[in-house]
Amino acid sequence: MPISDIEIVTPPETEDAPQPLFSELGLSAPIQQAIEEMGYRHPTPIQAQAIPYILMGRDVLGVAQTGTGKTASFTLPMLEILSGSRARARMPRSLILEPTRELALQVAENFVNYGKHLKLTHALLIGGESMAEQKEALNRGVDVLIATPGRLIDLFERGGLLLTQTKLLVIDEADRMLDMGFIPDIEKIVSMLSPIRQTLFFSATMAPEIRRLADMFLHNPKEITVSRPSSVASTIETGLVIVEEDDKRRALRKLLRESDMQNAIIFCNRKRDVDVLCKSLLKHGFSAGALHGDLPQSLRFSTLEAFKSGELKILVCSDIAARGIDIGGLSHVFNFDLPFHAEDYVHRIGRTGRAGRTGHAYSLATPYEQPLAEAIEKLTGKPIVRLEVKGIDQTEWSDEPRPRGRKRGGKPAEVRTTPQAPAPTGKTSAPSRKPAVESRNAVAPTAVSATAAPPARPASPPRHAATAHAREEHGNERPQAGFGGDIPAFMLLPRRTASVIPTPEDEIRPD
DNA sequence: AAAAAAT
C-alpha cells in the first residue's frame, strides 16, 4: 500500500477558544443536514463570522481568499434567506458575480450541494455556452443567478431578464474583477439593481481602489478579514531553478520525474506556452491536460473535472486557475514562468500545502528574471531557496538584457525545418523510455544542492490596516520552511553520468 | 508583457 494512503491528522488547534459548530449559526434543518452530509461540523473563521451578519440582513465586506471557505460563507446564508419564498419568471432574486467561468461553475456546484434538501433553482449565465438554455432557465424563474459579467449584460440588453427584484447581490473576487477591467461592467450591473438590497463583497486584498468600490456598493458593511494577503504558508516548500529558456522543459521533466509528485498544476504566463508545454509533456508520457481561456468551454470544464478526479495528474494552465479555483490536495505547484505580478506567485502556490500537509512549489526562471524573483521575495518576505538540477545547464542571474531574437511564443528568427524524415501515419512518437540511469548508483546527497538566496530586504511597510493586521496575526516570523529532515527525493539522486541528448520532442514548436 | 470576459 502506498505511503500516501496513511492519513495525516492535522494537529489540534492550540487556542483555548472552543470551535464553533454549524448548528450554532442559525441555519435551518435542511441546510444543516446538507452540511452534515458533506462531512462538515465546524465552520471556518470567515463562515463563523460572516453567516450571522448575512442572516441579519447586513452588508458584508469580506477580505478573504480561496481556501478560507469563503464561498460557503455566502452560499449557506443565501440559501437560508431565499428558502422562504419562490422565484418569479425572469426576475432572479439574487445575483452572484464571478470573474471567470470556472469560478461560476464552482459556485453553482456549491449551491447544488448545500441546497439539495431545498427546492431552490439556480441558473448559470456564462459565455461560451448556449444562450437558449440559459434563457429558458430564466423564463422558468430562478432564485439564484450565477454569472460572469459579459454574458449577464448581453442577456440583459436582449431583454432576457429583469434585475429589479434582485435584492441580494454578491460581488466575488473583486480584486480580480478590477485586474480584468470588469469594474465598468460591475458598475453597470449594480445600477440595474434596486438600491434597496443586501450586498456582499469579497476581495482577496483591500487596495485603495477596491476600498473605493466597496464604499460605493455597500451600506454600513460589517467588515471581516481572514486573509493572509502576502504570506506563504509555512507548509509550502519553495524552490527556484535558473535555466535558459530552451532548457526549461527538460528541467521541468526532471523535476516532475524525480520529485514525489502526486498531482500538480504547472503555470505558464502565456496561453501559447500552455499548449506547447502540454503537448510536450504528453509526448514524454506524462498524464497532462491544458487549461486556458482560448480553449472551448466544454474542454475547459471536462479537463478540470478530469484533473479533480485524478484521471489527469498534471494540469498545465494560464493564470485562469491562479486564483479562486479550489482544487484540494495538490502535492506540487510548478511555475514554468515566474508570474509578472508578485501577488500572483502567492495565489498560484497557495494551491498546495493545504490542510497541514507539506506542499511543494518549484519555479523556473531565466537568468534575466532576477527582478521578478526579487519582487516575490520582497512581497513574501522570504527568500526562495535556489535549487540546482543536475544534468541541466544552470546559470546565475545575468545583468545582461534578455537576448533579442526569438521570443518564446513568438515567431522563430528563421524558419526551422524538422530534420527527421516525415513520419508515416501511425504511432511513431511513443514516449521515449530512457534507461533509469539515476537509480543504478548509490545515493549521493549532494547531487542537487540548495542554497538560500541572501535574505530579502525587509518588506516595505504595509499599505493599509488590513494587511498590517493579517501580518500581525499570522506573522512573517514563522519558521522558514526549509529542507531540514524532509529533502525532496530528486535532490538525493546521483549525478547523471550519461550525457543528455536532447530528444526531438524538445524541439517542438507551435505550428 | 499577459490573462480573463460577449459575439
Image (tube, coloured by chain):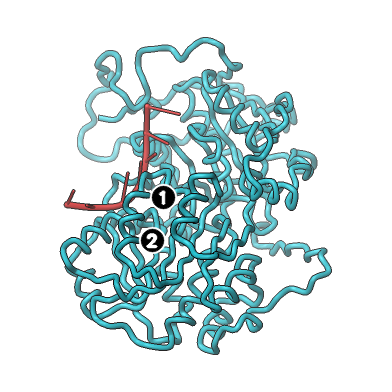
Chain colours: A cyan, B red
Judging depth in this view, the residue of A149 and A330 nearest the camera is A149
The spot of residue A278 in percent (x, y) is 39, 40
The spot of residue A323 in percent (x, y) is 49, 50
Q: Is residue A297 left or right of residue A66?
A: left
Q: Is residue A20 left or right of residue A510?
A: right
For disc 2, the neighbor class at 10 Å (few under 14, some 14 to 19, many from 20) is: many
- What residue is shown at x 55% (from left), y 69% (from top)? A73
Report helix, strand or loop for mark 1: helix
- What residue is shown at x 46% (from left), y 67% (from top)? A199
- What residue is shown at x 74% (from left), y 52% (from top)? A473
Judging depth in this view, the residue of A466 and A239 nearest the camera is A466
Disc 2 and disc 1: Cα gap in Å?
Answer: 9 Å
Report helix, strand or loop for mark 2: strand
Q: Chain of mark 1?
A: A
The spot of residue A368 in percent (x, y) is 52, 18
The amino acid sitting under disc 2 is Leu
Which disc, if any, is residue A97?
A: 2
Q: Chain of mark 2?
A: A
Q: Are marks 2 and 1 in contact (CB under 8 Å)?
A: yes
Res. A430 visible in picture = no
Q: Is residue A278 above or below residue A385?
A: below
Quarter containing the C terminus of chain A: top left
Q: How many marks?
A: 2
The amino acid sitting under disc 1 is Met
Q: Is residue A408 left or right of residue A249?
A: left
Which residue matches tag 1?
A177
For disc 1, the neighbor class at 10 Å (few under 14, some 14 to 19, many from 20) is: many
Judging depth in this view, the residue of A187 and A286 nearest the camera is A187
Q: Is residue A23 above or below residue A245?
A: below
Dot 2 or dot 1: first in sequence order is 2
Judging depth in this view, the residue of A175 and A135 nearest the camera is A175
